[in-house]
Image (tube, rainbow, N blue to C red):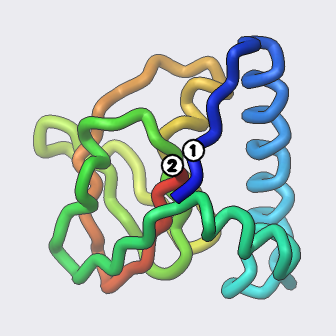
Amino acid sequence: QMELVFTNPVRARQCLEELQLLMKQVTEDSEHSKEHMTGTREMNELVKSCSEEYTVRKGDKIPNAATTDALFLIQRGCIRLTRNGQVEDVVREGSSFGLTNFVKRRVSVSYEAEASEDSVVWELL
């Protein structure tokens, strides 16, 4: 398990912005292989080595999603983000949720994350 620790807030923001840009490029690329959502096999392996993988059955919740500020990457499937029983967003394969709220300067909100179909999700640690 690898943990990234930043002591410089400017550098941390730069790294988060780079990750956000990478995710945006991958999401917009309709020709992109769904198995390699991060762009290259090498980058995919790097992200995977820094992540915990969850296989979530339809109707099950993603562990820790409501209690952490981690970045979650949807590798396969579809996840419903709910708050107080109301669906706030639906994220699909190739998308992410979580830490990106910080980068996008949105108010961080705690969501329940439930699979609307069998899914594979990576939690970037």
Question: What number is the disc on residue 125?
Answer: 2
Can you give x and y, in whole percent of width and height, for residue 47 in the image?
68, 63
Q: Is residue 17 above or below residue 94?
A: above
Q: Residues within 10 Å of mark 2 (few under 14, many from 20)?
A: some
Count up the numbered dots.
2
Q: Could you tell me which residue is drawn at 43 percent across and 71 percent down?
A: 53
Q: Is residue 16 above or below residue 102?
A: below
Q: Residues within 10 Å of mark 1 (few under 14, many from 20)?
A: few
Q: Are marks 2 and 1 in contact (CB under 8 Å)?
A: yes
Can you give x and y, in whole percent of width and height, for residue 76 in the image?
50, 81
* Residue 58 picture quarter: bottom left
Q: Could you tell me which residue is drawn at 49 percent across and 65 percent down?
A: 122
Q: Amino acid at mark 2?
A: Leu
Q: Nearer the viewer, residue 6 or 97?
A: 6
Q: Amino acid at mark 1?
A: Glu
Local secondary structure at mark 1: loop
Question: What number is the disc on residue 3?
Answer: 1
